Amino acid sequence: MSSEKFSIQIAPSIRAALEAGKPVVALESTVVAHGLPYPQNLEVAHQIEAEVLEQGAIPATIGVVEGVPTIGLTEEQLTIFAKGDHVLKLSRRDIAFAVTKKRNGATTVAATMALASLAGIQVFATGGIGGVHLGAHENWDISADLLELSRTSVLVVCAGAKAILDLPATLEQLETEGVPVIGYGCTEFPAFYTPRSGLSLTSRVETPQEAAMFWQAHKEFGGGGGAILAVPPPASSAINGDKLNEAIGTALIQAEEMGVKGQAVTPFLLRKVSELTEGASLKVNIALLLQNAKVAAQVARALQ
Ligand code: PSU
Ligand code: MN
């Protein structure tokens, strides 16, 4: 057993780009397999990759395929993940189990950061990170994404954390763990579906060049952890705040009543909020995923 060798699979075009120092953007697969409904998820996954390419960077969607950590899912693999049958949800702690059992597994923010970092990818675009759940003082539900951000050197471009979470507690936890949260042209922490959380950020940059400069400085002085570049969701897809809050309230009550626990909580809440807002939340979700991919690609380019 001690001679067991584990390998990670890096798509040839991504390997070539990394070796040549070209810009590469990591993308997660949990949002595809467990965060958005089929078949829109597959379409969105294609659009995100196209957006990164259009900005002159190489997209690298990450997952575990039949037990092999894979950087750059093929079209066929992406389709299997989008259909989602028997695709596990993997946080950092679950990767080894999927490898052992040769399973397909979609990587969360935490697991995607872990594998991106192994492959030498510095910039990662997603929708929103996991965080401290409401009621965490009783249920202890705090996403492993936060811990990963504190220890893995990847810049995560996202629209903050979802309003289904305890956002003040999430920001506090990030501060405790030494994870910078930088507003991209904003001074308020975005609440994923809306730009408004009422929570102020202490740092802000205006351009991809400034974000790249910040990231270089963080790698030098930040102690080896990650950072968040928080991009507000596009105004064009804005959602009615009252309707959204009502939907979130209902979704949280249903999760409680149905006894939804652990890894199932985030996918359940996202699906319910989408149903209850008649797809309005899904529309914002897709719009911000594309915008974040674009910004991430621009920052990756500026890092060259
Ligand atoms: N944000 C989204 N859609 C998602 C997720 C976040 O808009 O699907 C996923 C991400 O993969 C994130 C995970 O890392 O949910 C967090 O799950 P948990 O709360 O179980 O750590
Ligand atoms: Mn959790």
Image: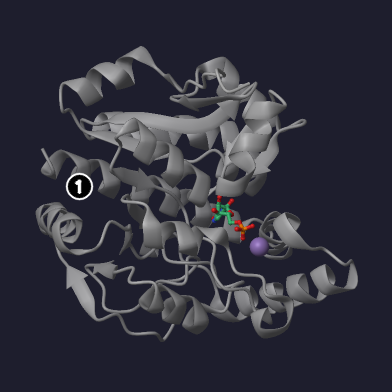
Report whether residue 61 is seen.
Answer: yes
Q: Residue at x 24, y 81 (%)?
A: 202
Q: Which amino acid, by three-letter code, is at mark 1?
A: Val
The local crowd at label 1, few if under 14, some if 14 to 19, many if 20 or more residues have their Cα within 10 Å, is many
Q: Residue at x 34, y 13 (%)?
A: 12
The relative height of residue 280 versus residue 66 in the rendered view (above or below) is below
Q: Residue at x 58, y 63 (%)?
A: 143
Of 225 and 299, the residue lying toward us? 225
Q: Please name the residue that numbered disc 1 is placed on.
A: 299
Residue 274 sits in which quadrant? bottom right
Q: Is mark 1 within 8 Å of ligand 1?
A: no
Which quadrant is home to the N terminus? top right
Is residue 113 rendered to the left or right of residue 279?
left
- The outermost residue toward the top is 12
Residue 22: horizontal and vertical position, in percent?
17, 28
Residue 225: horizontal and vertical position, in percent?
32, 58
Report whether residue 91 is seen.
Answer: no
Of 271 and 125, the residue lying toward us? 125
Of 231 and 260, the residue lying toward us? 260
The relative height of residue 219 versus residue 197 in the rendered view (above or below) is above
Is residue 33 rendered to the left or right of residue 43?
right
The relative height of residue 12 versus residue 278 in the rendered view (above or below) is above
